[in-house]
Amino acid sequence: MERAKESVNERKDNVIHLTRQNSQDVVTERGHKPLWYIRTKRIIYYILGVLETILGLRFVFMLLGANPRSGFTSFLYAITGIFIAPFTGIFNPVSAPGLAARSVFDPATIVAMAIYALAVWGIVKLLHIRASKNNPDFI
């Protein structure tokens, strides 16, 4: 009977840990990530998803020769121009005249999408390292 109680207590001890961080109680399960890490990671990836989506729209609109004087297109180009600016000029854009519109292949957009994705991946890995310092059972 004594042995059975010990094993139950050991199992409970292996499942839930209560740790103290910055005078806040944080409940974590062994092998699971802290709540702050999960929330921060989700927010960062959400922002990246929005940025990649608008950059992807810019790339497709330029490739298909969308009218730059259209309200939505000019708004999209203005917003994404801020994020593309550091990468403009690395490669020359290729343009082809079409029947009704001019199609532009803009490699700066693709480079920007790749660099931002790599930067976010690195930031999330740094957060992972930070979270693993506080929780030795962190996977």
Image (spheres, helix red, strand yellow):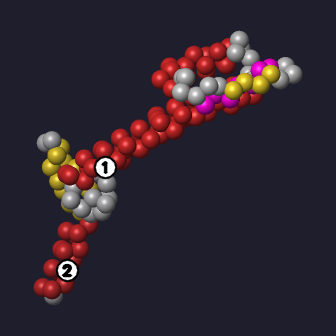
Residue drawn at x 17%, y 53% as measured from the top left: 19
Mark found first going from the N terminus, 2 or 1: 2
Does 45 sit above or below residue 105? Answer: below
Disc 2, SS: helix
Coordinates of residue 12 in the picture (x, y in percent)? 22, 70
Q: Which residues are magenta?
A: 101-107
Q: Which amino acid, by three-letter code, is at mark 2?
A: Ser
User: Quick one: label 2, few (<14), some, or many (20+) residues within 10 Å?
Assistant: few
Disc 1, SS: helix
- Name the quarter where the C terminus is drawn: bottom left
Does 88 sit above or below residue 115? Answer: above
Asked whether 88 or 121 is in front, the reply is 88
User: Does residue 105 belong to the magenta stretch?
Assistant: yes
Q: Quadrant of residue 27?
A: bottom left
Residue drawn at x 31%, y 49% as measured from the top left: 128
User: Does residue 48 belong to the magenta stretch?
Assistant: no
Instruction: Confirm whether residue 92 shows in the render.
Output: yes
Task: Determine which residue is flagged by label 1.
Answer: 128
Say which of marks 2 and 1 sits in front.
1
Instruction: Confirm whether residue 54 shows in the render.
Output: no
Task: Determine which residue is flagged by label 2.
Answer: 7
Coordinates of residue 86 in the picture (x, y in percent)? 47, 23
Marks 2,1: beta carbons within 8 A: no
Q: Is residue 121 left or right of residue 65?
A: left
- Name the quarter where the N terminus is drawn: bottom left
Residue drawn at x 87%, y 22% as measured from the top left: 99
Q: Which amino acid, by three-letter code, is at mark 1?
A: His
Residue drawn at x 74%, y 17% as measured from the top left: 67
Q: Is residue 45 left or right of residue 67?
A: left
User: Quick one: label 1, few (<14), some, or many (20+) residues within 10 Å?
Assistant: some
| Residue located farthest toward the top when viewing the structure as drawn | 69
